[in-house]
Structures are given as structure tokens and as C-alpha cells.
Image (spheres, helix red, strand yellow):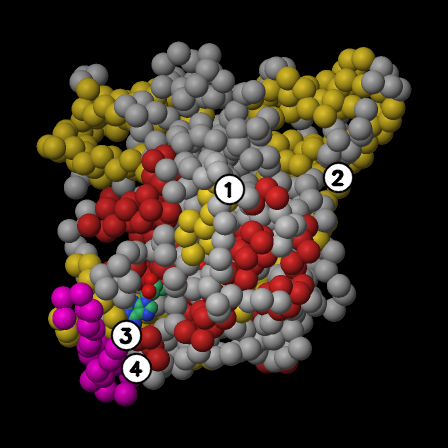
Amino acid sequence: MVLVQDRPVLGGNASSEVRLWVLGATSHMGNNNRWAREGGVIDEILVENTYRNPEGNPLLFDALLLEMVAKEPNITLLLNTAVYEAEKKDEETISSVKAVCSQNQTEYVLTAPLFVDASGDGIVGFLAGAAFRMGAERKEEFGELFAPDNTYGELLGHSLYFYSKDVGKPVSYTPPSFALQDITQIPRYRSFNAKDIGCRLWWIEYGGRLDTIHQSEEIKWELWKVVYGVWNYIKNSGEFPEAETLTLEWVGMIPGKRESRRFEGDYMLRQQDIIEQREFEDAVAYGGWSIDLHPADGVFSEKPGCNQWHSKGVYQIPLRCLYSRNISNLFLAGRIISASHVAFGSTRVMGTSACVGQAVGQAAALCKEKSIQPKDIFLKNHLPALQQALLRSGHFIPNVKAIANVGGNLVANASISASSELVLERLQEEGRISLSEAVAQMFPVKKGAAPSIIAHAFSDLPTELEVELRIASSANNFTPKVVLETKKLSLLPGRNCLRFTWEATFESEQYAYLVFHKNDVVQLATTLQRITGILSLFNTVNKAVSNFGRQEPPAGIGIDSFEFWVPKRRPAGENISLHFKPGLAAFGAENIRNGLARPTTAPNAWVAALTDKQPCLHLQWPEKQTVKRIELSFDTDFDHPMETVLMTHPENGMPFCVRAYEVLDENDNLIFQKEGNHQTRNSILLPEAIETTSLKIRLQHPAENIPAALFEVRCYPA
Ligand SMILES: Cc1cc2nc3c(=O)[nH]c(=O)nc-3n(C[C@H](O)[C@H](O)[C@H](O)COP(=O)(O)OP(=O)(O)OC[C@H]3O[C@@H](n4cnc5c(N)ncnc54)[C@H](O)[C@@H]3O)c2cc1C
């Protein structure tokens, strides 16, 4: 495989040249997508980056991407090499592309059976004559009620960021002569923050009314004008005394491009697919960012810099959006996939782009293996093979399960037992949290009666506390919209023991939410115990992303209203101290082959009891098996968004992740040992295949208050 990149480093907008943080279905901005961070390759990258680079240094992220690509023997990387021509062997087939490297004065002719265009502007697709669009669709075309008209604008613009630093002594500043002089042209000038840098300057946007490809250099000059004008105002207007010791450390040379061409596949994703979370037979990826559109006048607009409308949960992306409808051997990845302008408002973010990229990469491998074209995967029934291969690599597709016995996975036929299985009876009391904002505790339930629950509250005054038992509006989301029961409790000053029994029953396995409404005089008992698949949520406000505690879109745009329930940033996220009767038995060893390697409607993990001093999973077969490869999947907290820059991370190894484990054969011989693990997927290739009737996987608890958990185990003879 040849990877061609016209710039000196990898990552596109995520590189140190542009410095955007990678986000996707999980975001610190606040949405109702739980455990939604993308899996597979991007998970490996983000987990590694968070481990090595929790401070979000963009240069370290560049080096990590280069390292990961350089380590792949199958990839030939051509940096500083721009594709500029495509040769076709017939109307619908690309035979080769030409590229030139500015640094070694070499031209490359790259001949291949398949091409993937992930170039942002879609250079290969454009040169090959693939059908594309630029600008917004009319409302009528797909019935998208959120489709903008010309007054709002139909293209998103570019942005340029800057970084400043405090040098500890006064620094004067003389702007270049091209800097914007009249700052009042930027309506936001009254609320500048002198300390904002990088991604927080997303609103320095321009170009949505121009041709964002052919006028890109013009747009960049205008953005430089704005950047230096903003900095001049901060340094020299006298309004920002705190800026006296600040100097500019870096200004973007390459603008971040949001939107240009969108290509047409066999299907175009649209607003309703996102908002209604529609299902597709050929789902291979997913998204979860809001539909995030911006006024085309950008930084010069009086309108809010963005409009973000969310779905209640994540949505599927079908394979038919990931290849060109008229160029038979061209896959699409990144922001150019087949989506309407409105749907693109959500699919364009980098976590989603990476998820799509993984699906396309795997699809290309399948096409090569079977000598077929992208369209044939769907038409000739190769989709199950594609989906299963993706899931095996740690990729997640909402509502698609891995099948245990696919590909010779020996675990499918093993009998499974464990030294212990957590039955969650009590989250022990260790602290308190104020009910100055409403809190919900998520807990997994089975079909049938609700468990009775005891909680403890502390009140300053006699007061009434409202508590609800809620569930999500569908199994596809984590928006706790349905109130099953409401309790109004009279609290006395001091400690109050709150006992809940419920009439309500659950129709299926799912998460329930115990919602404690805001009450400023009340505190709840909390615990520091952290358990895979257990989360507390807060009804938070983040105006920057149109979140006022609720999503309240204007009528007539086809987007729902609902409340936002969001976890606190780690490690602050405490659970509420609760006592369940009967205890929650959702953490059994059988979960390691249930086809789901992250929490969905249940934790989907084997979790050991904390009292178990040597947690051990035991796989047994009636006859000897040949085992060469063992794949384990640990909990690196899919609810934690792992921004690559700027947003620092309080912990580098994820707290739920098992650090140390060992694997033993039928005679208790040690066949593999790991210490210092921080990765989700551990793929162990034994030096020699072994013959055994059993495997024991012994785990260490990650911490005193965090029990060991394992989502998935697979074993293969080769
Ligand atoms: C200001 C701004 C803020 C954003 N905020 C966020 C955010 O907070 N989080 C988030 O996840 N996303 C965000 N996005 C969206 C996201 O950055 C883009 O949608 C995403 O980077 C698109 O990925 P891509 O791979 O399609 O394109 P790119 O990231 O642009 O990558 C395309 C790559 O192809 C290369 N290329 C182009 N032409 C050629 C050629 N002819 N030959 C060889 N190589 C070529 C480019 O150099 C580039 O490296 C934002 C975008 C902008 C501009």
C-alpha cells in the first residue's frame, strides 16, 4: 500500500501544522453518547497519544503518527508528495495516479487496482471525474428541514489558529502592515479572551462564500489579516493588561479546511439518518458529533459562530456512502464521503473520519482478497465478512455484534468459568456531592423488576427532594427521556436514608437512570469505586455547543428537544453511593464472547469481584486445541474523549485498564506475561503454537477501588 501525503507530516487538520483536536462521537463539549469513542486503529492511536502525551503537545502527536505508519511493513509512505493527475483505463476505472515530491524532485506513477481518496478536497475523485457536489442541498432534495439557505450560507469556511506564550517580561508588538486595523469588523471583539489559543479560536473562520478550493490562498491571506489584527488588538488596545507579557509563539501557515467537495456514493447520508438514528443493512461505521453548521460569513458574521444540533445517540454510516457511485475502484474517506451538507455537518469530525477510514481500509483489503470492486461488497453479499473483520480489529458498529465462531475463534467452543463475577450490591460511601446540579446514576438492569435501591442524602434544611427512575427512549441511545416513576421525598436536616422500591418493570436489558433533581441544600453520598459500565451523569450546560441543559431547537427543523446528561471529566467522575437489592448481576464471564467489546445496553464485560485477590478467567476444551494467537480487549474507557491537543488529560493510563496479566496453559505453565499495559487491544502472537485443553488468564485489579475487567477474548490456531 502506498500512502501519499503532500505535506511533511501526517494527520491533516490534526497535525501540528493546523492543530485541531481529534474528536468524534465522544466529546468533552457534552452530548448523550455514552462509551462512543471510536475503536480500532484510531483507538490505538488516541490511547497511545494520551499515554505518552497527556499535555496535548501537537509535535508529539505528529511523531506518534509517523512512528505508527513507519512501523507498518505494508505501507510505503510518500511525504511532501502531491497527487496531480489521474489516468483511467476506461470511463469508470482509475488505472494510476501521478504524484510529485517537491523535496527530491521525483515524479511517481502509482498503479493500483483500488484507490482511496482521503485528501479533504477529493483530488483523486475530482481528477477522475467522480460525481461530487459543493454547497448545500435545497431542503426539498432530501426533506432536510435544517438545510440552510443563502442568507446563512452554504459552505463552511477555513480557520487559522495561533498559540501565544507568557515569557514573564513585557513584550511589545508591532503588527505586519497587512493586519486588520478596524477590529469592530469582527463582532466578537468585545468578548476576546487574551489567553485563548489553538482550538479555542475556532471562530476565526472565513471563506464560506468563496470557492474553498481555488480561492484557498486568498482565504488564507484574509485569515492571516484577521489573526494579526486580533493579536494587535489584544496587545495594543489597552483592554488586555494581562497580555503584556504574552508573545505570539506560533501562527498557522496552512488553514484548517472545513468544507469543499462532497462526493456522491450509492447513497447520500442525510439529516433524518442522523436524527432518527436510522439503521442500514450495510452499516460499517458510525458518527455522533452534532450537526454543526456555521454561518458562511464566519468571523465577520453577527450570527453565533456555530449551530450545533444533536441526535439522541450515535448513528450508523453505510458502506454505500464510502465509494464513488461512478468511479468503480474509488473509495472515499474523511470529510468527502457521500453525505448531504447537513449530514456532513456531523460526519466531518476526525474521530468519525478515522472510523470511516478504518471501514474503507478493511473494505479495500476484502476487495483485493476477493478480486471485487467496492460496490460488490454489498451486491455480492460480502458485507458480513467485512463487518466481522472490522469488529475483530476493535472497530465498533452500533447494533452489529461479532459472531464468536467466525474465523476459527476457539473461544466460541470453550467452556468458560471465572474465579469470581462481580454482583454489584453496594457502591461504598466515601464522599459527598452537592445537588447544585441534577445528578443521575446509570446502572444496568435486566428484563423484569427494578431492584430496590438505598441512597444517602444530607440536607442543611427540611426540604423536598424529587427523584426519578428513567430509561432511554430507545435501546439505541443514552438519552434518559422516559420517566418510569417519580418519588417526592421529605428530607430532614442531617443524614437521610432514602429507600426506593418500584412498581416499574423493564421490558429488556438496558441501562436505568436514577435521577436526583437539583436541590441546593442537599448533598448525596458518593463513592470512589469505579466499575466498568457504571457511570454518573450531570445535567450540564455548555452554551458554546447550543446546550442549555436541554436541546431546544426552533420548531420546524426536524430536530428533537431533550436534556443533556453528561459525565464529569475524569477523574472527578464519582458514582453515587447506592445499595442495590438484589445486587446487579451484569458482569458475568460469558460476556467475553457476547460479541460486544464495550458497554451498550449492558456492561458487556467480565468484571471480577474486588474481594477476589487473584481474578482468573478459565477457558476449557474437551480436547487439545492449537493456540498461536490470543486477543484480549481491555477497558480504556470509551466514554473518555481523547483530544489530541490543547485539552490536557488528568490521567495517562485509563483507570479501568488492566495493567498486568498472565496467561497459563493446562499445566499452569506461564505462556505469556504482560506488565505496564495501557492499550485496549492486546494481540498476543506466541512464539510457538501450543497444544492445550485449557487457558487461564490471570488479571490484576487496576487499583484498589477498580475491579479487573475484560471485554473480549479470542484465540486462534494461527
Ligand atoms: C477550524 C476547524 C475546526 C474543526 N474542529 C474540529 C474538532 O474540534 N474536532 C474534529 O475532530 N474535527 C474538527 N474539524 C473537522 C476536521 O478537522 C475535518 O473535517 C477533518 O480533518 C477532515 O479530514 P480529512 O482527512 O478528510 O481531511 P484533512 O484533515 O484535511 O486531511 C487531508 C490530507 O490530504 C492531504 N492532501 C490534500 N491534497 C493532496 C494531494 N493532492 N496529494 C497528496 N495529499 C493531499 C492534505 O495535505 C491533508 O494532509 C474542524 C475543522 C476546522 C477547519
Q: Position of residue 358 (x, y in %)?
A: 34, 56
> Mark 2 CB in 8 Å range of ligand 1?
no
Q: Which residue is mark 2?
A: 484
Work out which quarter of the rendered image holds the N terminus and state it: bottom left
What whole-number distance in Å separates the C-alpha atoms at marks 2 and 1? 61 Å
Q: Is residue 159 left or right of residue 542?
A: left
Residue that appears at 51% across and 79% down = 210
Secondary element type, mark 4:
helix
As drawn, the label of residue 329 is 3
Answer with the quarter of the image where residue 256 lies: bottom left
Q: Sort mark 2 into few (<14), some (14-19) or many (20+) by Cα contacts within 10 Å.
A: some
Q: Contact, CB < 8 Å: mark 4 with mark 2?
A: no
The earlier-in-sequence mark between 3 and 1 is: 1
Q: Position of residue 524 (x, y in %)?
A: 71, 22
Q: Nearer the viewer, mark 3 or mark 2?
A: 3
Q: Which residue is mark 1?
A: 170
The earlier-in-sequence mark between 2 and 1 is: 1
Residue that appears at 34% across and 39% down = 48
What whole-number distance in Å separates the C-alpha atoms at marks 1 and 4? 55 Å
The earlier-in-sequence mark between 1 and 4 is: 4
The kind of residue on which mark 3 rests is Asn
The earlier-in-sequence mark between 3 and 4 is: 4
- Residue 690, compared with residue 18, is above or below; it is above
Q: Which residue is mark 4?
A: 128
Q: Which residues are magenta?
A: 84-105
